[in-house]
Amino acid sequence: MAKTQSFSCSACGASHTRWSGRCDACGDWNTIIQATPLSSGPAKKSLGGKRGQSIVLSDLSTEETPPPRTLCGVEELDRVLGGGLVPASALLVGGDPGIGKSTLLLQAAARFARQGVKTIYVSGEEASAQVRMRARRLGLEDSPVQLAAETNLRDILTTLEVEKPGLAIIDSIQTMWADNVDSAPGSVSQVRAAAHELTTFAKRHGVSIIMVGHVTKDGQIAGPRVVEHMVDTVLYFEGERGHQFRILRAVKNRFGPADEIGVFEMTGKGLAQVTNPSALFLSERGTPSPGSAVFAGIEGTRPVLVELQALVAPSPHSQARRTVVGWDSGRLAMILAVLEARCGIPFAGLDVYLNVAGGLKISEPAADLAVAAALLSAREDKALPSDTVVFGEISLSGALRPAPQTENRLKEAQKLGFTAAIAPAGGKTGTVAGLTLTRPSDLVGFVGETFGAG
Protein backbone atom coordinates (compact mmCIF):
# COMPACT_ATOMS: atom_id res chain seq x y z
CA MET A 1 0.00 0.00 0.00
CA ALA A 2 1.39 3.41 -0.98
CA LYS A 3 2.11 5.87 1.81
CA THR A 4 -0.25 8.83 2.07
CA GLN A 5 1.51 12.18 1.87
CA SER A 6 0.19 15.21 3.72
CA PHE A 7 0.85 18.88 3.15
CA SER A 8 0.19 21.93 5.30
CA CYS A 9 0.24 25.69 4.83
CA SER A 10 3.07 27.42 6.69
CA ALA A 11 0.98 30.62 6.96
CA CYS A 12 -2.34 29.38 8.37
CA GLY A 13 -1.69 25.70 9.19
CA ALA A 14 -4.44 24.34 6.91
CA SER A 15 -4.01 20.71 5.81
CA HIS A 16 -3.98 19.66 2.15
CA THR A 17 -3.90 16.26 0.45
CA ARG A 18 -1.56 17.44 -2.33
CA TRP A 19 0.73 20.31 -3.11
CA SER A 20 -0.53 23.40 -4.89
CA GLY A 21 0.82 26.87 -5.47
CA ARG A 22 -1.93 28.66 -3.54
CA CYS A 23 -3.55 27.84 -0.21
CA ASP A 24 -7.34 27.63 -0.50
CA ALA A 25 -7.82 28.56 3.17
CA CYS A 26 -5.83 31.81 3.46
CA GLY A 27 -5.05 32.64 -0.18
CA ASP A 28 -1.26 32.92 0.25
CA TRP A 29 1.06 31.71 -2.50
CA ASN A 30 3.98 29.27 -2.18
CA THR A 31 3.27 28.47 1.47
CA ILE A 32 2.28 24.79 1.18
CA ILE A 33 4.99 22.38 2.37
CA GLN A 34 5.08 18.66 2.87
CA ALA A 35 4.46 17.59 6.48
CA THR A 36 6.49 14.62 7.69
CA PRO A 37 4.53 12.54 10.21
CA LEU A 38 6.30 11.58 13.40
CA SER A 39 5.68 7.87 12.78
CA SER A 40 7.87 7.92 9.66
CA GLY A 41 10.75 9.92 11.13
CA PRO A 42 13.65 9.15 13.46
CA ALA A 43 11.27 8.94 16.45
CA LYS A 44 9.88 5.63 15.19
CA LYS A 45 13.32 4.09 14.87
CA SER A 46 14.37 5.27 18.32
CA LEU A 47 11.32 3.61 19.93
CA GLY A 48 11.69 0.28 18.25
CA GLY A 49 12.77 -2.53 20.59
CA LYS A 50 13.24 -0.27 23.62
CA ARG A 51 10.94 -0.19 26.62
CA GLY A 52 10.09 3.02 28.43
CA GLN A 53 9.79 3.63 32.16
CA SER A 54 6.66 2.75 34.10
CA ILE A 55 4.44 5.75 34.93
CA VAL A 56 3.42 6.35 38.55
CA LEU A 57 -0.37 6.24 38.77
CA SER A 58 -2.68 7.68 41.44
CA ASP A 59 -6.39 7.52 42.18
CA LEU A 60 -8.95 10.29 42.33
CA SER A 61 -8.92 10.41 46.12
CA THR A 62 -5.24 11.40 46.31
CA GLU A 63 -4.94 14.71 48.12
CA GLU A 64 -2.43 17.25 46.89
CA THR A 65 -1.70 20.72 48.20
CA PRO A 66 -3.10 23.29 45.76
CA PRO A 67 -0.40 25.38 44.10
CA PRO A 68 0.31 28.68 45.90
CA ARG A 69 -0.71 31.84 44.14
CA THR A 70 1.08 35.17 43.98
CA LEU A 71 -1.00 38.34 44.03
CA CYS A 72 0.33 41.31 42.09
CA GLY A 73 -1.85 43.88 43.88
CA VAL A 74 -3.93 44.83 40.82
CA GLU A 75 -7.31 43.43 41.84
CA GLU A 76 -8.71 43.36 38.31
CA LEU A 77 -5.75 41.33 37.00
CA ASP A 78 -5.75 39.00 40.00
CA ARG A 79 -9.49 38.43 39.46
CA VAL A 80 -9.01 37.42 35.82
CA LEU A 81 -6.13 35.10 36.75
CA GLY A 82 -8.45 33.31 39.16
CA GLY A 83 -6.95 34.65 42.37
CA GLY A 84 -3.34 35.34 41.45
CA LEU A 85 -0.48 33.91 39.40
CA VAL A 86 0.07 30.14 39.65
CA PRO A 87 3.70 28.91 39.59
CA ALA A 88 4.84 26.88 36.56
CA SER A 89 1.90 28.14 34.49
CA ALA A 90 1.89 29.34 30.88
CA LEU A 91 -0.34 32.23 29.88
CA LEU A 92 -1.16 33.70 26.47
CA VAL A 93 -2.35 37.31 26.17
CA GLY A 94 -3.82 38.54 22.87
CA GLY A 95 -5.23 41.83 21.66
CA ASP A 96 -5.31 44.35 18.84
CA PRO A 97 -2.17 46.37 18.08
CA GLY A 98 -1.91 49.43 20.31
CA ILE A 99 -4.63 48.27 22.69
CA GLY A 100 -2.25 48.31 25.68
CA LYS A 101 -0.93 44.74 26.05
CA SER A 102 2.68 45.76 26.58
CA THR A 103 1.64 48.56 28.95
CA LEU A 104 -0.45 46.21 31.07
CA LEU A 105 2.24 43.53 31.24
CA LEU A 106 4.97 46.04 32.09
CA GLN A 107 2.81 47.35 34.93
CA ALA A 108 2.11 43.78 36.06
CA ALA A 109 5.82 42.91 35.87
CA ALA A 110 6.66 45.90 38.08
CA ARG A 111 4.00 44.86 40.60
CA PHE A 112 5.18 41.26 40.77
CA ALA A 113 8.81 42.38 41.06
CA ARG A 114 7.92 44.63 43.99
CA GLN A 115 6.24 41.63 45.64
CA GLY A 116 9.58 39.84 45.63
CA VAL A 117 9.06 37.76 42.47
CA LYS A 118 12.15 37.78 40.27
CA THR A 119 10.81 39.03 36.94
CA ILE A 120 12.39 39.10 33.47
CA TYR A 121 10.79 41.03 30.61
CA VAL A 122 11.98 39.89 27.16
CA SER A 123 10.96 42.10 24.24
CA GLY A 124 11.30 40.92 20.68
CA GLU A 125 9.67 44.02 19.21
CA GLU A 126 11.37 46.88 21.06
CA ALA A 127 14.85 47.72 22.22
CA SER A 128 15.58 47.83 25.93
CA ALA A 129 15.88 51.62 25.75
CA GLN A 130 12.35 51.87 24.33
CA VAL A 131 10.97 49.71 27.14
CA ARG A 132 12.75 51.95 29.66
CA MET A 133 11.13 55.01 28.07
CA ARG A 134 7.69 53.49 28.62
CA ALA A 135 8.63 52.57 32.18
CA ARG A 136 9.64 56.17 32.91
CA ARG A 137 6.36 57.43 31.48
CA LEU A 138 4.47 55.02 33.72
CA GLY A 139 6.59 55.85 36.76
CA LEU A 140 8.03 52.34 36.98
CA GLU A 141 11.72 53.07 36.44
CA ASP A 142 12.58 52.09 40.03
CA SER A 143 10.98 48.63 39.78
CA PRO A 144 13.45 45.70 39.97
CA VAL A 145 12.47 44.27 36.57
CA GLN A 146 15.25 42.82 34.41
CA LEU A 147 15.01 43.64 30.71
CA ALA A 148 16.25 41.92 27.57
CA ALA A 149 15.77 42.51 23.85
CA GLU A 150 16.17 39.15 22.10
CA THR A 151 14.37 36.94 19.58
CA ASN A 152 16.57 33.81 19.61
CA LEU A 153 14.55 31.26 21.57
CA ARG A 154 17.57 29.10 22.44
CA ASP A 155 19.38 32.07 24.03
CA ILE A 156 16.24 33.11 25.92
CA LEU A 157 15.69 29.65 27.38
CA THR A 158 19.35 29.39 28.38
CA THR A 159 19.16 32.75 30.13
CA LEU A 160 16.00 31.78 31.97
CA GLU A 161 17.59 28.52 33.07
CA VAL A 162 20.59 30.39 34.47
CA GLU A 163 18.71 33.30 36.08
CA LYS A 164 15.86 31.13 37.49
CA PRO A 165 13.16 33.84 37.60
CA GLY A 166 9.71 33.39 39.06
CA LEU A 167 8.05 35.16 36.14
CA ALA A 168 9.11 35.68 32.52
CA ILE A 169 7.20 37.82 30.02
CA ILE A 170 7.76 37.18 26.29
CA ASP A 171 6.63 40.04 24.04
CA SER A 172 5.74 38.61 21.62
CA ILE A 173 5.51 34.94 20.62
CA GLN A 174 5.33 35.86 16.91
CA THR A 175 8.81 37.43 17.03
CA MET A 176 10.52 34.41 18.58
CA TRP A 177 12.85 32.40 16.34
CA ALA A 178 13.72 28.75 16.96
CA ASP A 179 16.87 27.79 15.05
CA ASN A 180 15.78 24.16 14.75
CA VAL A 181 12.71 25.08 12.66
CA ASP A 182 13.27 25.84 8.99
CA SER A 183 10.83 28.71 8.51
CA ALA A 184 10.59 32.46 9.05
CA PRO A 185 9.69 34.03 12.43
CA GLY A 186 5.95 34.46 12.80
CA SER A 187 5.09 31.44 10.68
CA VAL A 188 2.83 28.70 11.98
CA SER A 189 5.73 26.31 12.51
CA GLN A 190 7.79 28.86 14.43
CA VAL A 191 4.88 29.96 16.64
CA ARG A 192 3.95 26.36 17.43
CA ALA A 193 7.55 25.39 18.24
CA ALA A 194 8.21 28.50 20.36
CA ALA A 195 4.99 28.07 22.35
CA HIS A 196 5.72 24.38 22.94
CA GLU A 197 9.29 25.05 24.13
CA LEU A 198 8.25 27.89 26.44
CA THR A 199 5.33 25.93 27.92
CA THR A 200 7.50 22.87 28.49
CA PHE A 201 10.18 25.03 30.10
CA ALA A 202 7.60 26.58 32.43
CA LYS A 203 6.40 23.16 33.64
CA ARG A 204 9.89 21.71 33.99
CA HIS A 205 11.53 24.62 35.82
CA GLY A 206 8.60 26.02 37.80
CA VAL A 207 8.64 29.39 36.02
CA SER A 208 5.47 31.29 35.17
CA ILE A 209 5.66 32.48 31.56
CA ILE A 210 3.35 35.07 30.00
CA MET A 211 3.41 35.19 26.20
CA VAL A 212 1.97 38.03 24.14
CA GLY A 213 0.21 36.99 20.93
CA HIS A 214 -0.83 39.03 17.94
CA VAL A 215 -4.41 38.79 16.68
CA THR A 216 -5.86 38.41 13.21
CA LYS A 217 -8.39 40.71 11.57
CA ASP A 218 -11.13 38.48 13.01
CA GLY A 219 -9.87 39.14 16.54
CA GLN A 220 -8.43 35.64 17.09
CA ILE A 221 -4.87 35.02 18.26
CA ALA A 222 -2.69 34.57 15.18
CA GLY A 223 -1.16 31.16 14.60
CA PRO A 224 -2.51 27.63 15.02
CA ARG A 225 -5.25 27.06 17.57
CA VAL A 226 -3.08 24.34 19.10
CA VAL A 227 -1.12 27.13 20.82
CA GLU A 228 -4.19 28.01 22.88
CA HIS A 229 -4.53 24.34 23.86
CA MET A 230 -0.89 24.20 25.02
CA VAL A 231 -1.10 27.00 27.57
CA ASP A 232 -2.98 27.04 30.85
CA THR A 233 -4.67 30.43 30.48
CA VAL A 234 -5.73 32.50 27.47
CA LEU A 235 -6.55 36.17 28.02
CA TYR A 236 -7.96 38.58 25.45
CA PHE A 237 -7.47 42.33 25.80
CA GLU A 238 -10.51 44.01 24.29
CA GLY A 239 -11.57 47.59 23.73
CA GLU A 240 -12.03 50.29 21.14
CA ARG A 241 -9.30 52.85 20.56
CA GLY A 242 -11.89 55.61 20.72
CA HIS A 243 -12.90 54.53 24.23
CA GLN A 244 -10.79 54.77 27.35
CA PHE A 245 -12.14 51.44 28.63
CA ARG A 246 -10.14 48.21 28.26
CA ILE A 247 -11.51 44.77 29.13
CA LEU A 248 -9.22 41.85 29.96
CA ARG A 249 -11.23 38.66 29.43
CA ALA A 250 -10.25 35.09 30.33
CA VAL A 251 -11.48 32.74 27.61
CA LYS A 252 -9.60 29.77 29.07
CA ASN A 253 -8.30 29.26 32.59
CA ARG A 254 -7.31 25.93 34.12
CA PHE A 255 -6.92 27.54 37.54
CA GLY A 256 -10.00 29.74 37.72
CA PRO A 257 -13.35 30.64 36.17
CA ALA A 258 -13.42 31.21 32.43
CA ASP A 259 -15.04 34.30 30.92
CA GLU A 260 -14.02 36.39 33.94
CA ILE A 261 -13.28 40.02 33.09
CA GLY A 262 -11.14 42.81 34.47
CA VAL A 263 -11.90 46.41 33.54
CA PHE A 264 -9.22 49.04 33.08
CA GLU A 265 -9.19 52.69 32.04
CA MET A 266 -6.47 54.05 29.77
CA THR A 267 -4.92 57.17 31.30
CA GLY A 268 -1.79 59.21 30.74
CA LYS A 269 -0.06 57.19 33.46
CA GLY A 270 -0.98 53.83 31.96
CA LEU A 271 -3.86 51.51 32.74
CA ALA A 272 -5.84 52.19 35.91
CA GLN A 273 -8.07 49.48 37.30
CA VAL A 274 -11.83 50.07 37.55
CA THR A 275 -13.29 48.49 40.67
CA ASN A 276 -16.90 49.36 39.77
CA PRO A 277 -17.29 48.89 35.99
CA SER A 278 -21.08 49.29 36.07
CA ALA A 279 -20.80 52.86 37.33
CA LEU A 280 -18.16 53.59 34.68
CA PHE A 281 -20.21 52.19 31.79
CA LEU A 282 -23.26 54.21 32.88
CA SER A 283 -21.38 57.38 33.84
CA GLU A 284 -22.14 59.21 30.58
CA ARG A 285 -25.80 58.20 30.48
CA GLY A 286 -27.91 61.35 30.49
CA THR A 287 -31.65 61.94 30.42
CA PRO A 288 -33.85 59.08 29.19
CA SER A 289 -34.06 58.92 25.41
CA PRO A 290 -35.79 56.54 22.99
CA GLY A 291 -33.69 53.54 22.02
CA SER A 292 -31.83 53.21 25.33
CA ALA A 293 -32.09 50.28 27.74
CA VAL A 294 -29.92 49.22 30.68
CA PHE A 295 -28.98 45.54 30.70
CA ALA A 296 -27.98 43.78 33.92
CA GLY A 297 -25.48 41.16 32.78
CA ILE A 298 -23.05 38.71 34.32
CA GLU A 299 -19.43 38.61 33.18
CA GLY A 300 -17.65 35.69 34.79
CA THR A 301 -18.59 35.96 38.47
CA ARG A 302 -19.40 39.67 38.62
CA PRO A 303 -22.59 41.51 37.66
CA VAL A 304 -22.11 44.33 35.15
CA LEU A 305 -24.66 46.92 34.10
CA VAL A 306 -24.29 48.35 30.61
CA GLU A 307 -26.37 50.53 28.31
CA LEU A 308 -27.74 49.16 25.04
CA GLN A 309 -28.46 51.75 22.36
CA ALA A 310 -30.70 51.19 19.35
CA LEU A 311 -31.68 53.33 16.39
CA VAL A 312 -34.52 52.45 14.00
CA ALA A 313 -35.01 54.67 10.93
CA PRO A 314 -36.68 54.33 7.51
CA SER A 315 -34.27 52.84 5.00
CA PRO A 316 -33.56 54.73 1.76
CA HIS A 317 -32.28 51.49 0.19
CA SER A 318 -34.14 48.53 -1.21
CA GLN A 319 -32.56 46.28 1.43
CA ALA A 320 -32.60 47.54 5.00
CA ARG A 321 -29.33 47.62 6.94
CA ARG A 322 -28.62 45.72 10.16
CA THR A 323 -25.53 47.04 11.96
CA VAL A 324 -24.39 45.69 15.34
CA VAL A 325 -21.46 46.71 17.55
CA GLY A 326 -20.70 44.60 20.64
CA TRP A 327 -23.34 41.91 20.12
CA ASP A 328 -24.08 38.97 17.83
CA SER A 329 -25.62 40.08 14.54
CA GLY A 330 -27.27 36.68 14.05
CA ARG A 331 -29.04 36.97 17.39
CA LEU A 332 -30.28 40.44 16.45
CA ALA A 333 -31.86 38.97 13.32
CA MET A 334 -33.54 36.32 15.50
CA ILE A 335 -34.99 38.94 17.88
CA LEU A 336 -36.36 40.96 14.96
CA ALA A 337 -37.98 37.83 13.49
CA VAL A 338 -39.59 36.88 16.82
CA LEU A 339 -40.95 40.41 17.29
CA GLU A 340 -42.56 40.29 13.86
CA ALA A 341 -43.84 36.69 13.99
CA ARG A 342 -45.08 36.57 17.62
CA CYS A 343 -45.94 40.20 18.35
CA GLY A 344 -46.89 41.48 14.89
CA ILE A 345 -44.31 44.30 15.00
CA PRO A 346 -42.57 44.49 11.59
CA PHE A 347 -39.15 45.97 10.97
CA ALA A 348 -39.22 45.58 7.19
CA GLY A 349 -38.01 48.68 5.38
CA LEU A 350 -36.33 50.00 8.54
CA ASP A 351 -32.61 50.32 9.15
CA VAL A 352 -31.65 48.91 12.56
CA TYR A 353 -28.50 49.92 14.44
CA LEU A 354 -27.53 48.39 17.78
CA ASN A 355 -24.59 49.43 19.95
CA VAL A 356 -23.24 48.34 23.35
CA ALA A 357 -22.03 51.51 25.05
CA GLY A 358 -18.51 51.62 26.43
CA GLY A 359 -16.93 49.13 24.03
CA LEU A 360 -18.00 46.03 25.98
CA LYS A 361 -18.80 42.86 24.02
CA ILE A 362 -21.81 40.91 25.27
CA SER A 363 -22.36 37.24 24.45
CA GLU A 364 -24.87 35.91 26.99
CA PRO A 365 -28.47 35.23 25.81
CA ALA A 366 -29.87 37.11 28.82
CA ALA A 367 -29.40 40.32 26.82
CA ASP A 368 -32.27 39.35 24.46
CA LEU A 369 -35.00 41.15 26.38
CA ALA A 370 -32.92 44.30 26.84
CA VAL A 371 -32.19 44.36 23.10
CA ALA A 372 -35.90 43.94 22.32
CA ALA A 373 -36.71 46.77 24.76
CA ALA A 374 -34.17 49.08 23.09
CA LEU A 375 -35.47 48.23 19.60
CA LEU A 376 -39.12 48.79 20.54
CA SER A 377 -38.23 52.01 22.37
CA ALA A 378 -36.49 53.33 19.25
CA ARG A 379 -39.26 52.18 16.90
CA GLU A 380 -42.11 53.60 19.00
CA ASP A 381 -40.06 56.72 19.92
CA LYS A 382 -40.86 56.10 23.58
CA ALA A 383 -38.16 56.22 26.25
CA LEU A 384 -37.94 53.62 28.97
CA PRO A 385 -37.80 54.84 32.58
CA SER A 386 -34.25 55.76 33.51
CA ASP A 387 -34.41 53.79 36.77
CA THR A 388 -35.27 50.42 35.13
CA VAL A 389 -32.99 47.52 34.19
CA VAL A 390 -34.02 44.73 31.79
CA PHE A 391 -32.71 41.19 31.28
CA GLY A 392 -34.00 37.82 30.09
CA GLU A 393 -33.73 35.33 27.25
CA ILE A 394 -36.25 35.19 24.40
CA SER A 395 -37.14 31.85 22.80
CA LEU A 396 -38.35 31.40 19.22
CA SER A 397 -41.88 30.80 20.49
CA GLY A 398 -41.94 34.21 22.13
CA ALA A 399 -41.66 32.82 25.65
CA LEU A 400 -39.24 34.39 28.12
CA ARG A 401 -36.67 32.28 29.93
CA PRO A 402 -35.20 33.33 33.29
CA ALA A 403 -31.55 34.27 33.44
CA PRO A 404 -29.07 32.68 35.88
CA GLN A 405 -27.90 34.61 38.95
CA THR A 406 -30.98 36.83 38.90
CA GLU A 407 -30.52 37.93 42.48
CA ASN A 408 -26.94 39.10 41.88
CA ARG A 409 -28.11 41.17 38.90
CA LEU A 410 -30.84 42.80 40.94
CA LYS A 411 -28.50 43.57 43.84
CA GLU A 412 -26.06 45.30 41.51
CA ALA A 413 -28.89 47.35 40.01
CA GLN A 414 -30.17 48.34 43.44
CA LYS A 415 -26.65 49.31 44.53
CA LEU A 416 -26.40 51.74 41.60
CA GLY A 417 -29.70 53.42 42.38
CA PHE A 418 -32.13 51.58 40.08
CA THR A 419 -35.59 51.12 41.54
CA ALA A 420 -37.31 48.87 38.96
CA ALA A 421 -36.41 45.76 36.99
CA ILE A 422 -38.05 43.72 34.23
CA ALA A 423 -37.15 40.02 34.26
CA PRO A 424 -38.90 36.84 33.05
CA ALA A 425 -41.17 34.93 35.40
CA GLY A 426 -39.87 31.71 36.91
CA GLY A 427 -36.48 30.80 38.26
CA LYS A 428 -35.05 31.56 41.69
CA THR A 429 -35.39 35.19 42.70
CA GLY A 430 -34.89 36.66 46.13
CA THR A 431 -36.46 39.87 47.36
CA VAL A 432 -34.28 42.95 46.95
CA ALA A 433 -35.29 45.87 49.12
CA GLY A 434 -36.18 49.05 47.29
CA LEU A 435 -36.54 47.33 43.90
CA THR A 436 -39.86 46.77 42.11
CA LEU A 437 -39.76 43.65 39.93
CA THR A 438 -42.02 43.16 36.90
CA ARG A 439 -42.09 39.58 35.64
CA PRO A 440 -43.80 39.01 32.25
CA SER A 441 -44.19 35.41 31.12
CA ASP A 442 -43.88 36.01 27.37
CA LEU A 443 -42.79 38.64 24.87
CA VAL A 444 -46.36 39.66 24.03
CA GLY A 445 -47.05 40.46 27.66
CA PHE A 446 -43.78 42.41 27.93
CA VAL A 447 -44.66 44.53 24.89
CA GLY A 448 -48.16 45.20 26.19
CA GLU A 449 -47.08 46.15 29.71
CA THR A 450 -44.10 48.26 28.67
CA PHE A 451 -45.22 49.94 25.45
CA GLY A 452 -48.99 49.49 25.53
CA ALA A 453 -49.05 47.38 22.37
CA GLY A 454 -49.03 43.75 21.36
Image (tube, rainbow, N blue to C red):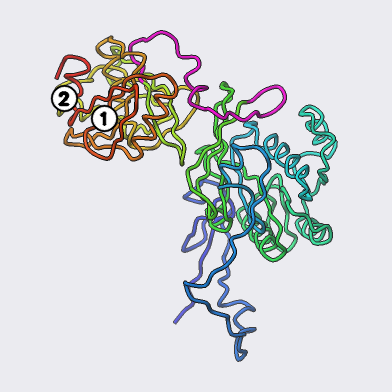
- Nearest the eye: 83 or 375: 83
- How far apart marks 1 and 2 lie (CA) works out to 16 Å
At mark 1, the secondary structure is helix
Please indicate, yes or no, whether residue 393 appears anywhere in the rendered image. Answer: yes
Q: Position of residue 293 (x, y in %)?
A: 35, 20
Q: Position of residue 84 (x, y in %)?
A: 62, 47
- The part of the image, by quadrant, that contains residue 177 is bottom right
- Other-residue count near label 2 (Cα within 10 Å), few / some / many at <14 / 14–19 / ≥20: some
Q: Position of residue 417 (x, y in %)?
A: 42, 19
- Nearest the eye: 133 or 268: 268
In the rendered structure, does residue 181 fall within the stretch colored magenta?
Answer: no
Residue at the spot of label 2: 445
| Residue 411, placed above or below residue 156 | above
At mark 2, the secondary structure is helix
Say whether residue 336 is left or right of residue 305.
Answer: left
Please indicate, yes or no, whether residue 21 appears anywhere in the rendered image. Answer: no
In the rendered structure, does residue 283 fall within the stretch colored magenta?
Answer: yes
Residue at the spot of label 1: 335
Q: Are marks 1 and 2 in contact (CB under 8 Å)?
A: no
Query: Image quadrant for the N terminus?
Result: bottom left
| Residue 165, placed above or below residue 279 | below
- Other-residue count near label 1 (Cα within 10 Å), few / some / many at <14 / 14–19 / ≥20: many
Amino acid type, label 1:
Ile
Query: Image quadrant for the C terminus?
Result: top left
Q: Which mark is residue 401?
A: none
Residue at coordinates 73% horizontally, 40% vertically from top-left? 111
Q: Which one is closest to the eye, mark 1 or mark 2?
A: 2
Q: Which residues are magenta?
A: 266-293
